[in-house]
Amino acid sequence: MAKPQKIRVAVNGYGVIGKRVAAAVVSQPDMSLEGVSDVVTDWRAQIVLRNGFRLFGATAESAKEMRDAGLETAGILDDLLGQADVVVDCTPKRIAAKNVETYRRRGIKFIVQGGEKHAVTGHSFVAECNYASAIGRDATRVVSCNTTSVVRTLTALKRAGLLQRARGTLLRRATDPWESHESGIMNTLVPEPEIPSHQGPDAQTVDPELDVVTMAVKVPETLAHLHYWSVQLTRKVSKDEVLDAFRRSSRIALINLTDGLVALNSVKELMADRGRPHANLYEVALWADMLRVQNDELFYAYMVDNQAIVIPETIDAIRALSGEVRDGSESIARTNAALGIEPSLVHARVDEPLHR
Ligand SMILES: NC(=O)c1ccc[n+]([C@@H]2O[C@H](COP(=O)([O-])OP(=O)(O)OC[C@H]3O[C@@H](n4cnc5c(N)ncnc54)[C@H](O)[C@@H]3O)[C@@H](O)[C@H]2O)c1
């Protein structure tokens, strides 16, 4: 029997998200990374080659600059697009919207990231919520890190029949670690000027039924975001019932302060010790022992690794667009297995099956 064809993937933009997407694609047995395209010529381009990936210039001009800098290039983005089934655009905010014209002209399926608007693709994606509606589409948008976490957690509550409405306050990291010499804030907190902040309405582009309002503040650190949520439940429930609802999502990891996971940096350190690439925390890390239920109201807090949370979603989005895997839970299981997403972040084994 002929071996099934792998889904051929191109990554345009090898920055914070692009480099993680490229590594995640390589780890999937049913995908191949055809190459990476960018505009830079410094260590960031050199590492593409060192990692064994083919490097393409985004334009003829950038390919020439790369060659002038002594970098071995395999051509330009247009060449790469001719060799791939799906392109994942990980260029900075609003550049992807311009690239879309090229993708459409070439007839290649494409994924944009959360810096772009919903209208760019007309479809916004979170695997556990709406995988099915992305199957076979030409394009989708993997929503931002914060929005991904909001949809994952509220979908878990909704599926258990517990969600009435949710109100969240988001403490947002000021900048990414590798860029912290260039921007970021110190010794202050900067409130977002509008309520609701954009993440609530953005979550509704994935699930219009969600009754959700978000408020946000920028905080002077770079590791991750921290969310505080207050949820009106549909009825009085026990804490166990709520925890069980969250446990049914494989991409929400329940953590405990009593395990020493008392802050964002301790969770990140745990991910490094587990040997995750870039110390990636792909899951929403939600404090189970802190979570409180008061009659029909629920209160909880969680951590979002903004650099990592959208990586498994992007891998599932590739499978959905390709149409190769029609069952969302099958794709999620494959992605989880390849990325090392397991029932517990801390414990080596869990006796109870947590994901049902
Ligand atoms: N950084 C995060 O935490 C985060 C989280 C979720 C989603 N996102 C979204 O992911 C997307 C990418 O963000 P990022 O943080 O990875 O950006 P980044 O600045 O870290 O990386 C962008 C990469 O694209 C390259 N690039 C610039 N112009 C290009 C062009 N014309 N053609 C090809 N490559 C080009 C840059 O050289 C860089 O390597 C954005 O939509 C962003 O909103 C970012």
Image: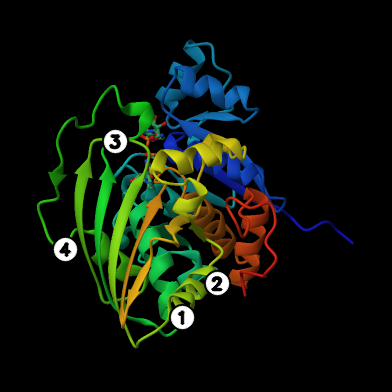
Residue 15: quadrant of the picture: top left
Asked if marks 1 and 2 touch (Cβ < 8 Å), the reply is: yes
Who comes first in sequence, dot 1 or dot 3?
1
- Residue at image coords 29%, 64%: 229
The numbered mark at residue 248 is: 2
Residue at disc 2, secondary structure = loop
Pick the front one: 3 or 167: 167
Residue 146 lies, with reference to residue 18, above or below; the image says below
Label 1 – label 2 distance at C-alpha:
9 Å
Pick the front one: 26 or 181: 181
Q: Position of residue 195 (x, y in %)?
A: 12, 61
Label 1 – label 3 distance at C-alpha:
34 Å
Residue at disc 1, secondary structure = helix
Q: Which residue is mark 3?
A: 221
Label 4 – label 1 distance at C-alpha:
24 Å
Asked if marks 4 and 1 touch (Cβ < 8 Å), the reply is: no
Residue at disc 3, secondary structure = loop
Between circles 2 and 4, the one closer to the viewer is 2
Is 106 on the left-hand or right-hand side of 210? right
**Three-letter residue code for mark 1:** Arg
Is 60 on the left-hand or right-hand side of 214? right
Mark 3 Cα-neighbour bin, 10 Å: few <14, some 14–19, many ≥20: some
Who comes first in sequence, dot 4 or dot 3?
4
Residue at disc 4, secondary structure = loop
Q: Which residue is mark 1?
A: 159
Who comes first in sequence, dot 1 or dot 2?
1
